[in-house]
Image: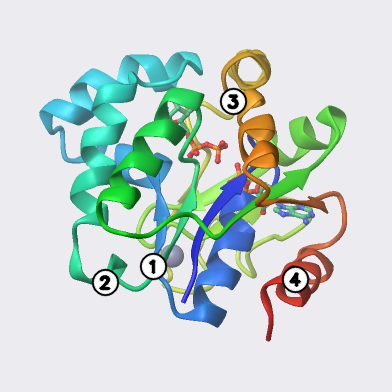
Amino acid sequence: MFRLVLLGPPGAGKGTQARMIAGKYSIPHISTGDILRSNIKEETPYGVEAKGYMDKGELVPDELVIALLRTRLDEEDCKTGFLLDGFPRTVAQAERLDNYLKKRGCRIDMAIELDVAEDILLKRMVGRRVCRVCGATYHITHMPTRIEGVCDICGGETYQRADDTVETVHNRFIVYHKETAPLLDYYQTGGILNRFDGSKDPETIFESIVSVLGA
Ligand code: ADP
Ligand code: ADP
Ligand code: ZN
């Protein structure tokens, strides 16, 4: 029974670890990036507004993301725990999340930080491929699909995200340092931050996280 947040720069491996953690502890994996991308695909008013920001590597306005997240957290499967991936990304978002949980008599149990150097991040992001159908994430060299361009899990087509280009990635790093890195202090002060070396291989990182959360 955990309420967790995953923190780290773009490309740190949050989505990759989130899938493993959510699977092991049977909690929903909530990625605001995935929710936004599905709104773009379905051309909802939220998606239409968010697209311009995402394509430039800017953050989507807090109010929009918070509205989408609240709707998701209100669902039944989140009552007993969840794992947030890509939210919060600003201190204001973290405060709104804490207030939301406080009103329901609960709180975030742990913030998991994945720490990775920028040169590694860049290579991870430009080589990232995502399944259009199920959202599974691959890497052209680190974690290739068995058949090029085809998802191992569902057979869907894999693609490169519009914001995973060298130029946009650079802006996302700047935004991360300015807007999101201050969250590390926020959770450190709250006494719930745990840092992991995200440059290791996915299984090793996952084992370290499990050793802290408990088997
Ligand atoms: P994030 O959600 O933090 O942006 P992802 O989980 O999507 O990160 O990972 C970014 C890219 O790096 C993907 O292509 C993924 O396959 C790859 N990747 C994830 N974790 C690792 C790792 N520990 N070592 C090498 N490559 C990784
Ligand atoms: P990554 O895993 O590489 O960090 P995400 O999929 O989490 O990327 O996010 C992609 C984009 O979606 C971000 O660059 C941003 O534009 C938008 N986004 C996702 N989550 C948030 C959030 N909590 N607040 C504002 N914008 C967000
Ligand atoms: Zn798939």
Q: Residues within 10 Å of mark 2 (few under 14, many from 20)?
A: few
| Quarter residue 148 falls in | bottom right
Disc on the earlier residue, 4 or 2: 2
Q: CA distance from mark 4 to mark 2?
A: 24 Å
- In x, y percent, where is residue 113? 70, 47
Left or right: where 93 falls relative to 67? right
* Type of amino acid at the residue the image marks with label 1: Pro
Looking at the image, which residue is at 42% across and 24% down?
92
Establish if 191 lies above or below 76.
above
* x 22%, y 19%: residue: 49
Marks 3 & 1, CB-CB < 8 Å contact: no
The quarter of the displayed image where residue 106 is located: bottom left
Q: Earlier in the sequence, mark 3 or mark 2?
A: 2
Q: Residue at x 84, y 62 (%)?
A: 201
Q: Pointer 1 and pointer 2: residues touching (CB < 8 Å)?
A: yes
Relative image position of residue 93 (x, y in whole percent): 41, 30
Instruction: State the CA–CA distance, disc 3 to disc 2.
Output: 27 Å
Q: Is mark 4 within 8 Å of ligand 1?
A: no
Residue behind mark 3: 180
Query: Residue 212 has which mark?
Result: 4
**x, y (%) of residue 90?**
49, 25
**SS for dot 2:** helix
Q: Residues within 10 Å of mark 4 (few under 14, many from 20)?
A: few
User: Which residue lies under the disc numbered 2?
Assistant: 77
Amino acid type at circle 3 is Thr
- For mark 1, what is the residue? 28
